[in-house]
Image (spheres, grey):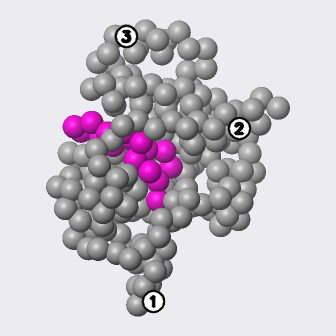
Amino acid sequence: MKNLILMIALICFNNHSNAQISSYPEGVYMDLQEVLDKAPSKTANAKLEHRTPGKIKMNGGNDYQINPLDKDVKRSFFLKDVFAYSEGTDLYINCSKYELQYWYSKVEGENENFFFFKAGIPMHPKKFGLENSDVNYMFGGFVGAFGAAKRALIRLPYVLDKPTKAPILVSQKNIRDYIGGSPRLVEAYDKETEKDAVEIISKYLLKWITEH
């Protein structure tokens, strides 16, 4: 029951927590540098789809999908080739570039050096310095508590380091590497009773990234 409540809370948190980010010109970004320059190299006649939980459970992948409207543009172009997409306001990162499941995640906050977003469970945990079993026991055992279909809905907190171009999975073990420069945030975080909960870690990352 506790795990079910946590799952419901996480889904609600995903749908309602958004930090202010810079607006991005509409278009297709083929690499991170284009994103940093806010200079998409391609235009696209495409539709942004917010995927339903049922579709995610059945097919896996992240929360957003880009569907081409031109018949001569293949679906695989957005699935595999594109780095990021913007509809003119928000930025959506292609998580398959970092093997964080397929399709796109919305950037929820950014500062000078980092993007913050939530995405699926790493497809290859060793690239994040983890063993396959480690992820199951992180975040209070939340990840390992569900079967495959519900696991597809789990969203974990990541920051993308702009200078190094590396995504980092943020957990209780390393969150102080980011919020540590703010004694106020550290003090508030230390008072939390469930410091390893995804929604708690995400909350403090959002506060940090919008304030620094």
Of pointers 3 and 2, the one earlier in the residue sequence: 2
Residue at the (45%, 25%) spot, across then down: 204
**For the residue carrying disc 2, how many other residues have a C-alpha within 10 Å: few (<14), some (14-19), or many (20+)?**
few
Could you tell me the amino acid type at mark 2? Ile
* Nearer mark to the viewer, of 2 and 1: 1
Locate residue 200, reporting x and y percent.
54, 26
Which mark is first along the chain, 1 or 2?
2
Q: Quadrant of residue 58?
A: bottom right
Label 3, label 1: how far apart the Cα atoms are: 53 Å
The residues tagged by marks 2 and 1 sit, at their Cα atoms, a distance apart of 38 Å
Image quadrant containing the C terminus: top left
**In the rendered image of this protein, does residue 93 appear above or below residue 131?**
below
The residue positioned farthest toward the bottom in the image shown: 72
Residue 142 image offset from top left, x and y in percent: 67, 36
Q: Which residues are magenta?
A: 103-119
- Asked if residue 190 lies in the magenta stretch, the reply is no
Residue 84 pos. (x, y %):
35, 61
Task: Determine whether 61 is above or below 121 in the image.
Answer: below
65 w.r.t. 70: above or below? above
The numbered mark at residue 184 is 3
